Amino acid sequence: MTEMVTPGDVLGNAAELKPGKGAYVNDNTIYASLTGSRRIVSPLPESLDQRATVEVTGHKAHGLIPEPGSLVLARVTKVMARMASVDILCVGSKAVREKFAGVIRQQDVRETEIDKVEIHQSFRPGDIVRAVVLSLGDSRAYYLSTAKNELGVVSAESAAGETMVPISWTEMQCPLSGQTEQRKVAKVA
């Protein structure tokens, strides 16, 4: 019989088990990070660590959830002095079924000259951004990063309502009015 668990349920002791997907360790105790079925996976015979892995397989109805390292597409909802708030739309190439909030902090916008980053010159509300999940962040939002060339704004709308075209790493242009706006533009392959 499979045991159903919810976030925060104790799954086992880290001395006997190691955490897998949907699990995390805190003070040598393994806890569930999502709702689903508790499952024990035996170690491979050649594995140096012979502890079994405990994991939680979520309900299919929940769909994908962002995890650290996941590539995501998100819509900017609010731009503040030190961060931009976003709603995560896709994990990888698949749409999410529920709403996940994210934050791109000033220090996570680009790799160089972090202290010179101005959020309002990098993102605007409505922009579609490609980012990578850094961590689960605080209880309200995932921490995201655009600090790689291929990450940043992939789609933006001008004041005239047209889809803007990237013209450099830091600018996008309205094809109708010719007006340029500052952005942290993603390099499109």
Image (spheres, helix red, strand yellow):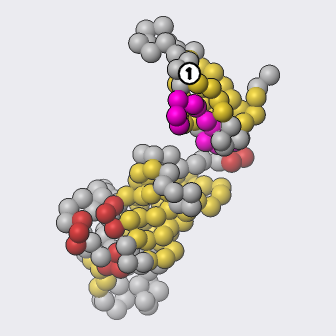
What amino acid does circle 1 point to?
A: Leu
Please give left or right for residue 169 compared with residue 109 in the image: left
The crowd level at tag 1 (other Cα within 10 Å; few <14, some 14-19, many 20+) is: many
Rendering coords of residue 71 (x, y %) = 44, 51
Provide residue 142's location: percent of width, then percent of height: 50, 57
Residue nearest the observer in this picture, 5 or 153: 5
The residue where tag 1 is placed is 17
Q: Position of residue 39 (x, y in %)?
A: 66, 25
Q: Quadrant of the N terminus?
A: top right
Q: Quarter of the image for the C terminus: give it.
A: bottom left
Magenta stretch: give its range: 26-35
Q: Is 94 placed above or below 140 here?
A: above
User: How many numbered discs sit on the rendered protein?
Assistant: 1
Residue sitting at x 43%, y 90%: 160
Residue at the far left in the pictured view: 113
Residue at the right extreme of this rendering: 1
Q: Does residue 162 appear in this view?
A: yes
Which quadrant of the figure has residue 173?
Answer: bottom left
Residue drawn where x is 37% and y is 89% of the image: 176
Left or right of residue 57: residue 188: left
60 in magenta: no
